[in-house]
Image (tube, rainbow, N blue to C red):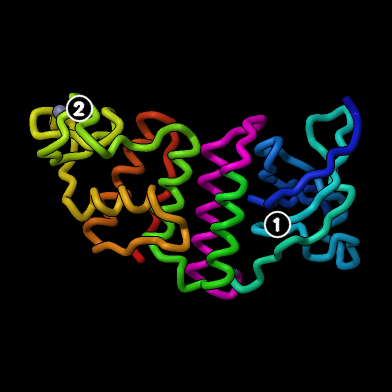
Amino acid sequence: MPGSLKTEAIVLRGIRYGEADRILHLYTPERGRVSAIAKGVRRAKSRFGGRLEPFFRLNLVLYQGKSDLMTVTSAETIMGHPRLREHGAALDGAARACDAVSRLFGDGEPHAGVYHLLANQLALIDREPAKATRSNALTFRLKLLLAAGFAPHLASCASCGEPEHLVGFSGAAGGVVCAACEAGSFALSQDGHDFLVSALGRSLAEVPDASPAALAQADRAISETLEHHAHVRLRGVGSR
Ligand SMILES: [Zn+2]
């Protein structure tokens, strides 16, 4: 039904539309992912200024008319995150975080926890762009898996419950597996296992560091979990 919606939102993505408009993919706490058109936003004298750009956290008023696409009628900046835009790794980390949220959580799937996780991630790498490391990107993804209900099982064998001799990780089984259940798994080192456990258990700002080999295993564990259980394929997190 037609009407206005006042909401906070993070701009995930903007797509040029027509001569001066932009279609925005937004993530909101109460409506999940929504799309809205910002009319005239690409004109030099747009009343929106430069606010409707990716990674901005905003207070918006959106008008819902008869079409599915809402129209932005007002926008106020909460956080513009200017520093992350000046740092290549932070900019890349922000883009990957927004892309992952967009792919994992479809339209009409509200998840206030995901909204706050994304807001925290953008604020963290804006405040300290050097925190935009590979372990930070993997920690963010693990926390997204948790929010989506696909957190890997790490405390005992995901297939048989055996608490010891955990030697592999199986995306199909949904977690670590023991020597007897290792078919279809890949080898997971103690360091890789430890990273997964602490990344899920600690806050984003306290990202544990780990060896490149452990991070590569964590990356593969996350990718295989997503492919098996969410049918989503994300770009790798890079080699930093
Ligand atoms: Zn087992």
Q: Residue 163's quadrant in the figure?
A: top left
Q: What is the secondary structure assignment of the residue under circle 1?
A: strand
Does residue 93 belong to the magenta stretch? Answer: yes
Tell me the quarter of the image containing the N terminus. Answer: top right
In front: mark 1 or mark 2? 2
Q: Which residues are magenta?
A: 85-113
Residue 200 placed where, x, y %?
38, 48
Q: What is the secondary structure assignment of the residue under circle 2?
A: loop
Q: Which of the numbered marks, if any, corresponds to residue 161?
A: 2
Q: Reading the chain from its start, which is encountered first: label 1 or label 2?
A: 1
Residue placed under numbered mark 1 in the picture: 57
Q: Residue 203's quadrant in the figure?
A: bottom left
Residue closest to the eye, 171 or 167:
167
SS majority, magenta: helix
Residue 26 placed where, x, y %?
69, 45
Query: Would residue 119 appear left or right of 14 to someone viewing this image?
Result: left
Residue type highlighted by circle 1: Arg
Query: Would residue 164 appear left or right of 53 to someone viewing this image?
Result: left
Query: Relative to 143, is 136 above or below?
Result: below
Residue type highlighted by circle 2: Gly
